[in-house]
Image (cartoon, helix red, strand yellow):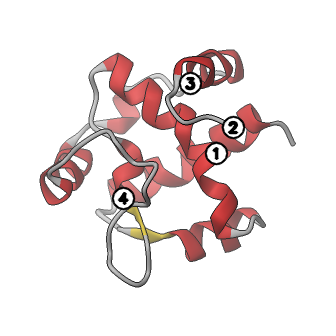
C-alpha cells in the first residue's frame, strides 16, 4: 500500500472517530491499520498539511500518545490541543470532500518534517 493509500485509509478512520467524538491512541490506530505506531506520523503528515491548507480543523489532533494524551512531536497544526480537538469534533467531516491519493501525495511534498 502506498503512503497516499494509507493516508486515505487513516482519513476515513479519523473522520468516523471525529463523528463519534473519539480520541484515538497511536496504538489503537496502528492495530486498526496493521502498522507499528512509530510509523504512523509519516502517514498522518499529509493529512495534517491538507487540513492546514484547506483551513479546516486539524483532524490529526485526535490521535494521541497513550502515556500523556497528546499528539506526537510531529503534530504542529495547533498549540491549544483541547480546543483543536473540540473543533475537530464540531466540524462536518461528511460535508468535506475526502482527499484523493494525488491530493495527499501533493500535500506530503509541502509538509514540514517529511522523511
Q: Nearer the viewer, mark 2 or mark 4?
A: 2
Q: Is residue 81 left or right of residue 9?
A: left
Look at the numbered disc 2 and give the secondary structure of its residue: loop
Residue situated in front as seen by the camera: 34 or 20: 34
Question: Percent x, y for residue 56?
Answer: 28, 28
Q: Alpha-carbon distance for marks 1 and 3?
A: 16 Å
Quadrant where the N terminus sits is top right
How many other residues sit within 10 Å of disc 1, few (<14), some (14-19) or many (≥20)? some
The reply to whether dot 4 and dot 1 touch (C-beta < 8 Å) is no
Residue to which mark 1 is pinned: 42
Q: Earlier in the sequence, mark 1 or mark 2?
A: 1
Which numbered disc, 1 or 3, marks the residue that appears first in the sequence?
1
Q: Residue 93 in the image: x percent, y percent?
A: 36, 37
Give the left or right position of residue 105, taking residue 85 as reference. Answer: right
Distance from disc 3 to disc 4, alpha carbons, whole Å, reads 18 Å
Which mark identifies residue 115?
2
- The secondary element bearing badge 1 is classed as helix
Neighbourhood count class around disc 4 (C-alpha, 10 Å): few under 14, some 14–19, many 20 upward: many
Residue at 64% x, 40% y: name it. 7
* Between marks 3 and 4 in the image, the one whose residue lies nearer the viewer: 4
Label whose residue precedes the other's in the sequence (4 or 1)? 1
Residues at marks 3 and 4 touching, judged by CB atoms closer than 8 Å: no
Q: Residues within 10 Å of mark 2 (few under 14, many from 20)?
A: few
Mark nearer the N terminus (2 vs 4)? 4
Q: Position of residue 94 (x, y in %)?
A: 39, 35
Residue contact between numbered discs 1 and 3, judged by CB atoms under 8 Å: no
Measured Cα–Cα span from mark 4 to mark 1: 16 Å
Amino acid at each position: 500500500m502506498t503512503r497516499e493509500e494509507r493516508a486515505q485509509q487513516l482519513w476515513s478512520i479519523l473522520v468516523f472517530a471525529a463523528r463519534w467524538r473519539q480520541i484515538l491512541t497511536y496504538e489503537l490506530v496502528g492495530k486498526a491499520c496493521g502498522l507499528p505506531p512509530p510509523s504512523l506520523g509519516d502517514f498522518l503528515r499529509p493529512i495534517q498539511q491538507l487540513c492546514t491548507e484547506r483551513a479546516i480543523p486539524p483532524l490529526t489532533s485526535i490521535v494521541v500518545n497513550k502515556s500523556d494524551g497528546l499528539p506526537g512531536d510531529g503534530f504542529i497544526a495547533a498549540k491549544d490541543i483541547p480546543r483543536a480537538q473540540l473543533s475537530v469534533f464540531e466540524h462536518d467531516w461528511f460535508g468535506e470532500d475526502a482527499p484523493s491519493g494525488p491530493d495527499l501525495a501533493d500535500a506530503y511534498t509541502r509538509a514540514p518534517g517529511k522523511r
